[in-house]
Amino acid sequence: MAGPASRRPGTSSPGDRGSNPGRPQATPRPKSAASSPGGTGTKPLWVTAPNQSYPLALAQPGRDATMRRLMGAVMVVAMLAAYTFVVPIVNGAVLGLGFVADKPSVGWDEYVSAASAFHFVWGLAAAHLSLASITLIAWGFYRLWHHRRLGWLWSVSGTVRWRYGVVCLAVSVLVIGAVTAYYWVSGSGWGAQPGWVWYAVVIVVTTPFQALAEEVMFRGYLMQAFGCIVRQVWFPMICTAVIFALFHGTQNPWLFASRLVFGILAGLLVWRTGGLEAAVAIHVVNNLCALGLAVATGSLVEVRTTTSVDLTQAGSDVALFAVCAGACWAIAHGMKVPRRTPDVVVD
């Protein structure tokens, strides 16, 4: 995840329990015998914790600490294992379709190498769709393993807060779009590569799902998993930011630092706004603008294979995201979006 400056695609205290006027108050439902203190005397394994910030939504205060940490560690390992196993399979399947459709004059190994560098449009589709598959894995874990409504993975309100998300999307378009326009005007101008129309179609269709998947995985599922291991907000934010940066592959220290800071700022934004909406909106717009600019200037392959940036580039990318994040944070405060789960959680 990085900003248009580099034209590279994706680059209160933890214990705060203050009042939250915007937090919804749910009506309790009757408890089952299995979860009632008067029933079997056992707690359900996964319960959305009441009056908790987003990173700690699954870290139930009354549960045995050892069991909670163990299950959090299992969640982390399961998600990383699913990523390692599923993404290459989906990537290979899409590249296989491309190999059949393109009928290239080179062999399979050469085709995969060239497509992975985005010399073929199927490489771009494969990269995005393989990452997008992680959203389904995370939602599958959440629903089938934890037996939680998917809305709790979105926000502390247990649903997508569409009005807030749309406002964040509009702000991101204005800020990142303006910076992208500046780089377009001050750059070399139009120089799109052959077949740019197909690249544009794939970018518009698949990029939102790719950016969504990264947020759902890192700032969503993994953040709540690490929150089970250590019930302090700083721990899941730092852990997910480090993994996010490392998963972008080979990179020099400045490029790694820019992605690390992006991950930390995104984690802060999720914590202070109580959900994924703002981070998803900024990530989607950033990647659309970065990839769109790269296609228009014929630099998509260069962007894909970039492994280093300088301090100025890294700083400008971080500054751009910080501006967007600050604006979305202020909007959340103004709209009084809930930052903590309800006092009584109903699933």
Image (cartoon, grey):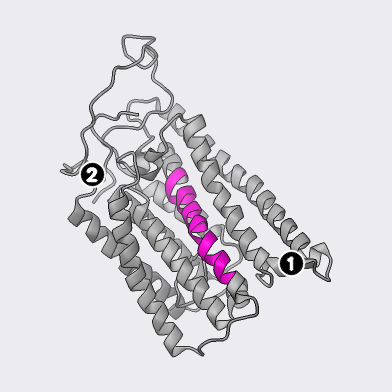
Residue in the picture at 25% in, 35% down: 342
Report the span colored magenta.
199-221
Kind of residue at badge 2: Asp
Tell me the residue that label 1 is attached to: 113
Q: Is residue 2 visible?
A: no
Observer-nearest residue: 266 or 301?
A: 301
Image position, residue 253 (x, y; %): 52, 70
Tell me the residue that label 2 is attached to: 16
Residue in the picture at 23% in, 31% down: 26
Kind of residue at badge 1: Ser
Instruction: Count residues near mark 1 (Cα–Cα under 10 Å), then give few for <14, some for 14-19, many for 20+.
Output: few
Say whether residue 257 is left or right of residue 111.
left
Using the rendered view, name the quadrant where residue 344 is placed: top left
Say whether residue 299 is left or right of residue 150.
right
- In three-dimensional space, the C-alpha distance between marks 1 and 2, rounded to whole angstroms, equals 49 Å
Q: Nearer the viewer, mark 1 or mark 2?
A: 1
